Image (cartoon, grey):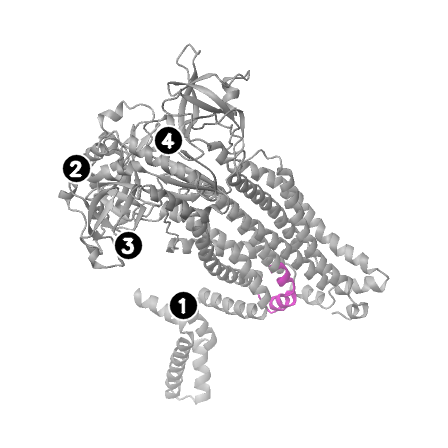
Amino acid sequence: MLSDFLFRLRAAFRRETVEEELDDELRFHLEQEVAKRMAAGMERPEALREARLALGGLDQVKEECREARGISALETTLRDARYAIRGMSHSPAFTVAAILTLGFGTAAVSTVFTLANTMFFRELPADRPDRLVFVQASRSHGRRMGWVGYPDYVHFRDHAKTLEGLAAHYATAPLFVNSASRSEEINGAVVSANFFPLLGVQPALGRLFRPDEDSVPDRDRVAVISDRFWRDWFNASPAALGATLKINGTVFTIIGVAPPAFRGITVYPNEIYIPTMMMRVGCRWCVDALSNGCATLDMIGRLRDNYTVAEAGAEMAASMPQSWLAAKEGENSGIRVLRARGVLDLNTGRSGQIRFTELLACVAGVLLLVCCANLAGLLVARNSARTREFAIRASLGAGRLRLIRQLVTESVLLAAGGGVLGMLFSLALTGVLNATFYSINEEGHPLYYNFSPEFRVIAAVVAVSIVAGILAGIIPAFKSIRARGGDSLIGQSSPMRANSRLGRGLAGAQAGVAVALATIAGLLATSARAVIAGANFDTSHVALMRLRPRLLRYPPDRAQRVLRTVADRLETAPGVESASMVGTGAILFGRDAQVSLRDWADSRTIDSRFIEVGPRYFETLGTPVLRGREFDQRDTIESPPVAIVSEALARQLWPTGNVVGATLIVNQQPRQVVGVVADIPLETRGEPVPPFVFTPFWQNAAQLDARFLVRVKGDPKAMLPELIRLANRVDPDVPIGETITLPAQMAGVNLELRYMAGFVSFAAALAILLSAIGLYGALAFSVSRRTKEIGIRMALGAESTTLLAMVMRDGMTAILAGVSIGVVLAIGGSSVIRHLLYGSGTNDAMIYVAAALVVAGAGLLACWVPARRAASVEPLTALREQ
């Protein structure tokens, strides 16, 4: 079998040699037959004649031998490919346009495939990654991901029989690092001692954790650093081994360096790893970081041979801790085991990622259909110019299927070229998107997404390109060979009129899709700008930074003294207009709280958003105070508890308007309402604005951290280094992180919206360009084929303006029909993306009109050039046209 396969392979790729061997062999057999007959007494001419009759004709025998090789289909395909390449080389403009068209379309598809592969299918950088699994706690009946405390992790680790090992990691540990030359907050990880062995990670230098170094709390202060940290902080010097680092105020000794390719197993690259027994240094949010009350750990395991994910999941569910079986809502109550593939993003739900990727895939698919329609129009025009060629080939005996196969082969070659070009475009596009959207998060922390292409992505893109080429080429191929050979040859002698209805129809369809995409892109881009600019708040000129005395375990009085001093110095710094701070929670989003009124007889409460803010918070944000006052220096721990409510909460609780001076119960503490502020709408369209309650930062004696917001006169990004230096002079040991501008943070919070807006804008621009090119090509071809008709019309007295209007009418009828359909498509598409849109939508009509006008304008320009050409035809020259 192998020798037969090798022979067929040789016959396909060394055809001339095999043909020579066949000639030699047949000549040998012929000579043998001749010799046999001459030995029987025949003369050579008679013997030669009889031998040829006996063999049945050399050409027929050769053909039978070729058929026996079983590669005739391959040889025919290769001939078709060679012929197609020669034909494309004779039409370089068409070839370039077709390959570019499919290249842009497949670039979008390739980008979506790359994104989906990274998010959901890429395996971890580890040994035998196919056996790794994520073991995740779940809450709210499996609707939300949960984390586990250290004792619960030990329980699962010790009861797992289907797993070779189970490791724990806390991948977003805030570590403020001091060395002799610099200090900086970096992203670290707290990991169990078996973390690296489980993944099969070997140190690039030194060693990794021993089991005994992760057995006694707070004893072994050892650290493993990343290759990047080693090169950046130690110049890749071997002297880093044994060096010390002060991490969150505790001195650690470096024992090893991780390999360059290993950056952790989440999107947050880890620079330093410390053992779980040092959790009290890495996690400062809990009284006892090693208790079950401090749920911060994720788990990753490795399946034993002959066990499946389902079996591991069943075992884990059967061995849950007793406390989980009677857990309250919001606590860990279930567990699941998943293949360790894709991105483990600790802050983004997998369902949200799937829905976002599906939307991108729909846009890319629509764009690819537009590209196919454009390519089909180009092929119709090109094939119509080859009617005489097809007629001659048909007259010489070529069947319709043979001609169709030839044309489809040309389309597939164009598609393959477009697919390769699309992959190259995708590499550049993905790099730009990665740097723009996926390099840092909303707090300024670095992110790492591996968007390098894998074989399955390349194979999928090539397959999609080939299918697209076949779909784009099959209709033009059938259209081109419909006419019978003799009729076509006769018809070519005096071409009077060419029907470009299909080309105009395809251009109109592209225009409709372009209107829909342009409208959706406009809605998304407007929403992205609106949410970053802010409604009832002004993000411009606001810089952010976070001070974290908690990481150093400062007592509350010392921590608040540092924070108050920093606040006072920021207020008086040159270039600062105002400054404030917030407690735990984001600058604008806060956290959940329960509020009620004193006169409610039962224990009824309502849900509200809650933020602890400092004096001048609303002034710094630019949020209007509608009634009463905002917090000031009077609101301290010694003064009566007060609160400020948003307009939405005021309407809900005090519909009569008697708000200021009323008493509000916030998290079971009575507070007097001293002001009402305008709502800050941060929800998408259709969602109600949530109620907010604000309390004074300085009325919480337990405040240990603060996020500062500072409004400056100039560029907040340029001002940040000076603000950091000013805060650092107060206490150089206090960690300073999350240094970012407020517009950049809002952009990071709305990452999906910005990504979607950019991607759809690219698709819309390309669709508009392709629709204009397609219309231009169809009309230009029609004019070129109707030159003699136009000349007759002009000879009979037709005005040039009449001909101009005739061609313009042909083109604009298709475009305007497409625009009308596109508006309907846009209305349907906007409902699909409604969950991404912000604002009231009062200006949506203008976006619809603008999209329609842009596409119609592009179509008008595409019609004008061939129309002018038709109007400028010389009658005598046109009448000589053959």
Please state which amino acid type lies under the numbered disc 1: Ala
Q: Residues within 10 Å of mark 3 (few under 14, many from 20)?
A: few
Amino acid of disc 4: Arg
Give the residue drawn at x 48%, y 17%: 661
Kindly check if marks 3 and 1 are in contact, taking CB atoms under 8 A apart as contact. no
The image position of residue 74, as x and y in percent, is: 44, 65
Closer to the chain start, of discs 1 and 4, is 1
Farthest residue, direction right: 797
Q: Is residue 469 among what the camera can see?
A: no
Magenta stretch: give its range.
Answer: 379-399
Residue corresponding to mark 3: 233
Q: Nearer the viewer, mark 1 or mark 2?
A: 2
- Name above or below for residue 837 compared with residue 463: above
Q: Percent position (x, y) of residue 431?
A: 44, 55
The local secondary structure at tag 1 comes to helix
Which amino acid does the dot numbered 3 rest on? Trp
Give the residue drawn at x 52%, y 56%.
Answer: 104
Q: Secondary structure at mark 2?
A: loop
Question: Label for residue 143?
Answer: 4
Q: Are marks 3 and 4 in contact (CB under 8 Å)?
A: no
Q: Which mark is residue 114?
A: none
> Foreground: 1 or 717?
717
In primary-sequence order, the first of circles 2 and 4 is 4
**Residue 380 counted in the magenta span:** yes
Dot in front, 3 or 2: 3
Q: Which residue is mark 1?
A: 68
Q: Residues within 10 Å of mark 2 (few under 14, many from 20)?
A: some
Give the residue type that dot 2 points to: Pro
State how far apart marks 3 and 1 are (Cα).
Answer: 70 Å
Which of these two is toward me, 135 or 171?
171
